[in-house]
Amino acid sequence: MGLQCLYQGSAGALAAAIARDVFIDELKKRFRDAHWQDPDEREVRSWKNSIPTVIQLLVEAGLEEVQVLLELKAPITDVRMDMVLVGTFPGTDLGSIVVVENKQWSWLKPDGKMVRLSRDGIPRLHPANQLWGYLQVLRGYVPMIVDEKLCGVVNLHNAPANMVQAVRPKDQGLEKLVQEWVAMYGAEAHREEFKDVLRRRLSGENAAQQAETLLQAPVKPGQGLMTRVAECVRERAVFPLLDEQREAYDYVRHLVSASKQGARKEIVAILGGPGTGKSVIAVELLGTLARQKVNAVHATGSRSFTRTLWKYAGPPGKQRGLFTYFNSFSDATPNDLDVIIADEAHRLRKTSHNRRNKGDLREPPLQIDELIHAARVPVFLLDEHQVVRRGEVGSLDLIRYRAEQLGYGIREINLRRQFRCAGSPEYIDWVERLLMLRRSNGRPDWQPLENFTLYVARTPLAMENYLKARVAEDYTARIAAGFCWPWGEPNDDGTLPNDVGIGDWHRPWNSQADDYLGNIPPSPLWATDPAGFGQIGCIYSAQGFEYAYAGVIIGPDLVWRNGWQSERSYNVDRDQNQAPQFSTVIRNTYRVLATRGMRGAVLYATDPATNQLLIDLGVPVLEE
């Protein structure tokens, strides 16, 4: 699957459409067809106010044949780039690409390596860093792109030139590569500079062919977090951080500098659904801080996630010591750490211990307070729809409340971009509407997507055979199920009992052992070790991980009877079936399991009526 955009045409054709006042309506229609919804009004204003400023310069520069791609979807994510200009590099036969990020800002001021949009505003992501992320994605995932024929321009057409000059990458001390690849232009005299850059970087010769070559270019698949975690922590930045991801990353680094100057303590809460890159931010941030000798640690409440990070971070030693658990800070010296990164913070418990010892009758401190007190900059990353067991209390409301009670500031950053499920927010949205975890206008009928494959299976064997075929093609795949079957001990010969039984199909749960049983991985490594395929995972072995194709068995603890009914008696996990909000916990569980896949998913419900619901909603049926 190649790259996709909302509109492709020459600068001259777009100029004519703008003059006829028809191009906004056309873009709105294309947006509705592609995204199942109307564009945001702010986006429409940007189209109307910003696009013509670039088209005018192209026409004035004699570049009417240069191809303009509007709202180009970046590889591996749902991020859309405002404008991508494609032509031939002057004097060569090589394609040339200029990515334009439009900003309608009329006032901005530098603040460290970020910017403020008002005199009393909070620091925001620097637009050059935002654009640099887009360039990284293109050069990293589209092999045909030649580095020296790619650049970016931030178009601040409403901002005075002197303000833009103050925040240009070189003047604001941004990284050297950002300075080399990204330019910024404002109003007034900057328009001529912008026009000169367009002439130097682009010609209209063979521009249409160059654009088609780009759109049809193969896209290299993204690598999972765990496969590159050691490189990320020890050596260099690995994953491009886009939009709110980069804003969160830069803001934490901004707070580290501010804390050393005695600034008021501030808590950072980063919220995002499945696949929005929460753990990528956490590991990239940890790696950068560690390389800069900043005292930072990563903590979770997940044994599986932490043990997997230990495995992939490298041999025991300094790297492993960067990863620990939420309950490790009961006796921490206040502010001894510079930064604590609390990943999967929805898994916070009320306390780390029931009591310190039998004779201590005092109430133990809140676990969240222990984490807040342990570091000068506490960072919490969470998804409130991933609370899947009794006793998990992590929420944005809790973080807000403790920040207020302790007298600290709080900055909330919402991650909107989707990196899992082939960058298809439509699939995540459909899963949440299906499970009634978000409001749905009418039935959540499935609309096929070009870059994400969804099936419903009539039998678990059909699901397994499909996923086996994907594994044979060198993709990763796993089957996970609701906790609806007992979980037995290994057999005397070291094999696993076939506890998960559906008709004449029987398979084992993943291993509960702390170490390998032959080649069978322990539970924490089930999602990442290739030998995990063939055992059925549960929510605790799947949460926090990703694989190319996800198989999901919806057990009898959730059935459709003209609405969802959750059945405690069919769920054998005490932490789930004794949860006060059992219905929400179970629907959250299946949301998590259904959103592990990066390229596709197969759903199967043991209840015939529930499986038929999926078919009736238009999910294609997997051939036997």
Image (cartoon, rainbow, N blue to C red):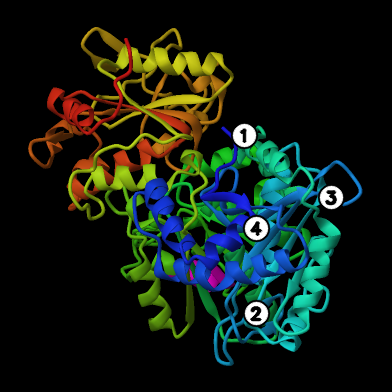
Residue 89's label in the rendered image is 3
* Of pointers 2 and 1, the one earlier in the residue sequence: 2
401 to the left or right of 607? right
Which element is circle 4 on?
A: helix
Which element is circle 2 on?
A: strand
Q: 376 or 180: which is nearer to us?
A: 180
Does the magenta portion include 371?
yes
Amino acid type, label 2: Val
Which element is circle 3 on?
A: loop
Amino acid type, label 3: Phe
The residue to which callout 2 is attached is 115
Query: CA gap, disc 2 to disc 1?
Result: 33 Å
Q: Nearer the viewer, mark 1 or mark 4?
A: 4
Q: Nearer the viewer, mark 4 or mark 3?
A: 4
Residue at image location 79% in from the left, 46% down from the top? 205
Q: Nearer the viewer, mark 3 or mark 1?
A: 3
Query: CA gap, disc 4 to disc 3?
Result: 19 Å
* Of pointers 4 and 3, the one earlier in the residue sequence: 4
Residue 12's label in the rendered image is 4
